[in-house]
Image (cartoon, coloured by chain):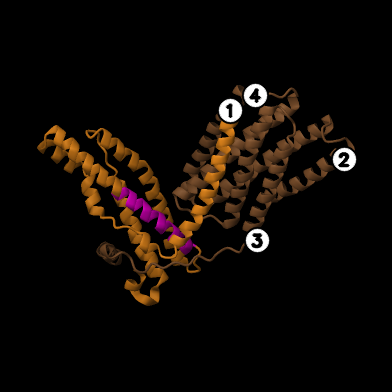
Amino acid sequence: MTTTIILVLISVLALACLLWLAKGRTVSANILQNPTEHMRAVDVEAFRNLVDPDEEQFLRTNLSPPEFRRIQRERLRAAVEYVSCAAQNAAIMLRVADAGRRSSDPATAEAAEKLVDNAIRLRLYASLAIPRLYLGMILPGAHISPSRIAESYEQMTRLVVLLGCLQYPTRGISAAL
Amino acid sequence: MFCAYAALQVVQSAILFVISKHFGFSTPEYKQVYSMTVAASAALRFAVIYELFKDFFRSYPLLIRPGRILLRGGTIVLLLAALGLAVLAPGNGVELLVNATNVLDRTVSILQCGLLISLLLFSRYFSLSWGSPAVGLALGLGTFASVSLAASSIRLHLGLFSVHALDIFTMATYHLCVLIWMFYLLRPERATSYVLNPLPKHDLDVWNNELQRLVQR
């Protein structure tokens, strides 16, 4: 009896989950109408500084162990915030680029294709980096270096600019931005 | 593949209708044919889901490997869970065929529901766009799988081949799924329009620097 009740409850939850996931697609389509409104600022240099091993080493040697652990936790918490913002921006760019892939202009389609790849790569890195950063918060002494996120994010921003220029050639670069 | 599944559903309904008229609804003949059609439908539904996975990841080559891991990993975990359930809760029916059919239905429903939810979750996490027919197929199949899971679990618990209210509910759900499929398949694809203007102000310096670097290359 218990198994049956549990399975019926699971099936109700599964149905609710399916409907929620299908509804979520409409919401993300609305984001596409004005993607820049949903994008958040990400300071790549600040993020690099937060995950820089030399910086970490410097703090380790100049601070007392309890102080270092406290500061390091704060730094990693901020790094998680940066990665989350970058990943969210990547998700929006991905949707934008996905639409650009269907462009009749080969250059735009190619730039959009590259942007899709970079945004996916960033989401993949983010999904790996965030647990590592949290692990670093639990064990502040452990060596964490998700600097590939920063590289990937920079590469992606360059591609967004390129895609914008290709889609709005007559309006000039500033209009594309 | 979905067309083959839809065609099979039509053919099997006709066959079952003829058999029920000839031999009756609770006869061994009807139960045998019903069990066979349940197995055939389940196999075709798996083929449709596999095709959805393939179609989805074909557009994103970078995700083929993680997608394969998701499909294989998800199948193994769900299959183990479903088989564990089949061993631990084999059902109360006295007829072997009825019991086996319901266990098969429950196992298949768990697998299909889990796979479709993982696929939709995966696409949501990566914010990937999916053609609306594919979303409709996944939603319809998932809805039917989740209701089948509940129905087969109750049938197994009661040890019965047929529970009238449950049969009506399952049939109604199937018709709802057909409506979902029709809605998504017949609805024209929405053209995506978007604007990149303006970017947040605080990002402009970064963008300009990056652009300068791009131009100087």
| Nearer to us: label 3 or label 4 | 4
The magenta span reads A82-101
Q: Position of residue B96 (x, y in %)?
A: 74, 24
Q: Which residue is mark 4?
A: B90
Tag 1: residue type? Thr
- Mark 1 touches mark 3? (CB < 8 Å): no
Measure how far apart labels 2 and 4 are at the Cα level.
31 Å
| Nearer to us: label 2 or label 3 | 2
Q: Which residue is mark 3?
A: B186
Tag 2: residue type? Lys
Measure how far apart labels 2 and 3 are at the Cα level.
35 Å
Q: Which residue is mark 1?
A: A3
Measure how far apart labels 1 and 4 are at the Cα level.
11 Å
User: Drawn colour of chain A?
Assistant: orange
- Mark 2 touches mark 3? (CB < 8 Å): no
Measure how far apart labels 3 and 4 are at the Cα level.
42 Å
User: Drawn colour of chain B?
Assistant: brown
